[in-house]
Amino acid sequence: MRWCSQIGVCVLNKIWVVGIGPGAYELMTIKAAEVLRGCDVIIGYTVYVDLVREHFSEKEFLTTPMTKEVDRCVLAFEEAKKGKKVAMICSGDAGVYGMAGLMYEVGVNYPDVELEIVSGVTAATGGASVLGAPLIHDFCLISLSDLLTPWEKIEARLLNAWKADFVICLYNPSSKKRKDYLKKACDLMLQYKSEDTVCGLVSQIGREGEEGKVLTLKELRDTQVDMFTTVFVGNSQTKSLNGKMVTPRGYKNV
């Protein structure tokens, strides 16, 4: 099957790399849903495929477990070579700790397959709406997973984010093998930030059991979280207002 891009370049096949949002079907973008309805096969990490399976039950589904991301990408390209319309799905946004970058890297070996990235609602913005308005001013995203990034580099990024007074949104704060990583990150920040710094966390964003909580940095240090939790550490102006986490934009006379 031949597809022609907007710039007039024709390729044999195409893969859509789709961010499905935090989890709930209602939080998926209209374009993402349309792409999934129009494809032949949906490929992804097992947990993410289970989030969409009931809404697209007539599709063919192919999955790989965690740590098999390269195999998953190769699988997608091989299916596309067969003439199938393929969707590679990721939670949140495909370009934020998602599969978009790796798909382009693997795609060098498949010049006849075109990629299109379909954006989605990432955990930072999905979680922020639960907590209130923590990301109204400058912020940064940092993953605490050291599977692909050395912990020393993660520490350096945390310290530089603190020096710049960013609101810090932490992805992948914990796992079975990294139970103390959030505590380590908090200990690092507590050397320089007030223990009363307003923080927040949201678990199961957009899924059954969604729960948000506003707390201090000191309290966050001793809080148990999992890989389905997103953590927010406020800047020096972030405050708690009526139980919500709010970072002022800087408007006067408020």
Image (cartoon, rainbow, N blue to C red):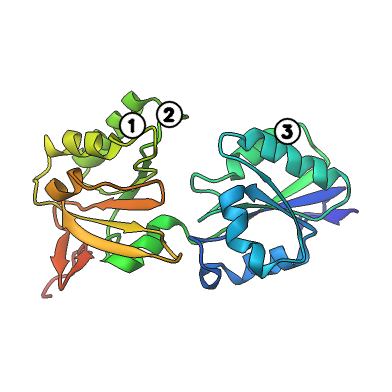
Of pointers 3 and 1, the one earlier in the residue sequence: 3
Residue at 44% of width from left, 65% of height from top? 206
Amino acid type at mark 3: Val
Residue drawn 13% across the image and 39% down it? 190
**In whole angstroms, how far apart are the C-alphas of marks 1 and 2?**
7 Å
Q: CA distance from mark 3 to mark 2?
A: 23 Å
Horizontal and vertical percent position of residue 65: 60, 40
Q: In the rendering, which numbered label is found on residue 108?
A: 3
| Residue 58 on image: x %, y % | 77, 66
Residue projecting furthest to the right: 1
Q: Where is residue 155, by image quadrant?
A: top left
Residue identifier under label 2: 149
Q: Kindly report which numbered mark, 3 or 2, lies closer to the viewer in this rendering.
A: 2
Q: Residue at x 32, y 64 (%)?
A: 211
Callout 3–callout 2 Cβ contact below 8 Å: no
| Callout 3 secondary element | loop
Residue behind mark 1: 154
- Taking the image as shown, residue 218 lies to the left or right of residue 48, namely left
Picture coordinates of residue 111 (x, y %)? 80, 37
- How packed is label 1: few (under 14 Cα within 10 Å), some, or many (20 or more)? some
**Reading the chain from its start, which is encountered first: label 3 or label 2?**
3
Which quadrant is the C terminus positioned in?
A: bottom left
In depth, the one of 207 and 249 nearer the eye is 207
Closer to the camera: disc 3 or disc 1? 1
Residue 135 visible in rendering: yes
Q: Is residue 227 left or right of residue 169?
A: right
Q: In the rendered view, would you say 95 is above or below 191?
A: below
